[in-house]
Image (tube, rainbow, N blue to C red):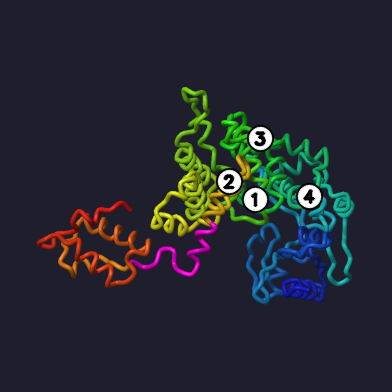
Amino acid sequence: MSRPEAIAREICARLAADGFTAYFAGGCVRDRLLGYPPGDIDIATDARPEDVRRIFRRTVAVGAHFGVVVVVEGGHQFEVATFRSDGAYVDGRRPESVEFTTAEGDASRRDFTINGLFFDPAGGEVLDFVGGRADLERRVIRAIGDASARFREDRLRVLRGIRFAASLGFEIEDATWRALVDAAPGIGAVSAERVRDELVKMFVAPGRLRAFDLLDRSGLLARLLPEVDALKGCEQPPQFHPEGDVFVHTRLMFSLLEGDVSPALAFAVLLHDIGKPPCASVDPTGRIRFNGHEHRGAIMAEAVARRLRFSNAETTAITEMVRNHMAFKDTPNMRLAKLRRFLARPHFDDELELHRVDCLGSHGGLDIHAFLLDQRARLANEPLVPPRLLTGADLIALGWKPGPHFRTALETAQNLQLEGRLQSKEDAIEWARAQTQSGGDGPGPASRQPG
């Protein structure tokens, strides 16, 4: 038994000792029955919020109006919610009011039957008022009660239903699916942050392809990521892309990602070619071309990431991966200094994985991938970009006057350092001294080597 579960059991026991009923609720019960380690353990009880706050020393009333109090015990936080039934939903997100009720009444307000289960830690009994155990055995996602009403109450539930189906490998029951498709147009009323969080949970996990397909079939992909939907029918030159159009290529790449991945990588794969439709052209030989699509795509990808309220760091990572994905073809011809900088980029591991699935999702050749793995292994025992041997202070000490030539000299010296042609501080100083013009005004022509 994990420590969080042991603490959750103790919370339930303390509530019971005070005369209240307390159960584990929702997803943790579902996961227990499926044999998965439970994530966050939520607790449902007939104790009122004021009772919970009286019994436990450290609490946070995050939603006392809705009967939710966070109990802090042993360095862990547990949501303790009073059994409730919900009043009218007017904003497609939360009820205007709640009434405290029984465990059965609480179960009936939840989204899907597999999430409407309770577990009594004292007696070891699962309480099922909604048929959730049977649906777990059938591997079915089914809305509790009227599916259309459940989706109207909280429009995000259409994404949750798809996420559960994808992550668990379950089918969505027919009536629930029809209601989900009917409710899909309302997804625009959901905040970008809530949508992003659901999409991230879907796409970082191994069930990502199933989620992608269900989003597409339901119409949600076109509403949430119209730039990806627009890839359908965008034809590519068959000699390089025998797999089909850009949408087929992107979907295939998505299927080739392995295990859990970062949100930035998942979205970079989805968005890496969204610049192709606006850049498509046919040259005089009849070949389809997408000149500059990586740069147009980077601009579009940044707009998508900001629309979904990704952090600045994740937006930058997604955008840079899209912008740089065509640069890999040039790496075998790069000078060593440029190659080392390329390998040292902050998101290189994700970029390399994007390159791998890009190749496997098209022509199938992994020669550049193998080359880069070999180069990185060869340089593994030293910093790819070590501290500079030559600094501006060194140039000033040699009598140089600060100016634009400083940058040229310092970059050239670093290139020589990265290529092993300057190996010590003394080498760098001697090189700089050799570049000095008479009078010490700056570097001579020899310093203007290509970087």
What element does badge 1 sit on? loop
Image point 50% across, 31% down: which residue?
Answer: 289
Res. 189 in view: no
Give the amino acid type for the residue marked by disc 3 in the picture. Pro
What element does badge 3 sit on? helix
Q: Which mark is residue 328?
A: none
Q: CA distance from mark 3 to mark 4?
A: 25 Å
Label 2 close to label 1 by CB (< 8 Å): yes
Residue nearest the observer in this picture, 300 or 1: 300
Q: CA distance from mark 2 to mark 1?
A: 9 Å
How many residues crowd around disc 2 within 10 Å: few (fewer than 14), some, or many (20 or more)? many
Res. 356 in view: yes
Label 1, on which residue?
257
Foreground: disc 4 or disc 2: 2
Q: In x, y percent, where is residue 128? A: 87, 57
Locate residue 403: give its quadrant: bottom left
Is tag 4's residue or tag 2's residue first in the polypeptide sequence?
A: 4
Foreground: disc 3 or disc 1: 1
Label 4, on which residue?
169
Label 2, on which residue?
269
| 143 sits to left or right of 273 | right
Q: In x, y percent, where is residue 329? A: 49, 45
How many residues crowd around disc 1 within 10 Å: few (fewer than 14), some, or many (20 or more)? many
Give the amino acid type for the residue marked by disc 1 in the picture. Leu
Label 3, on which residue?
185
Locate residue 116: give its quadrant: bottom right
Image point 28% across, 69% down: which residue?
Answer: 427
Label 3 close to label 1 by CB (< 8 Å): no
Label 4 close to label 2 by CB (< 8 Å): no
Residue span colored magenta: 373-388
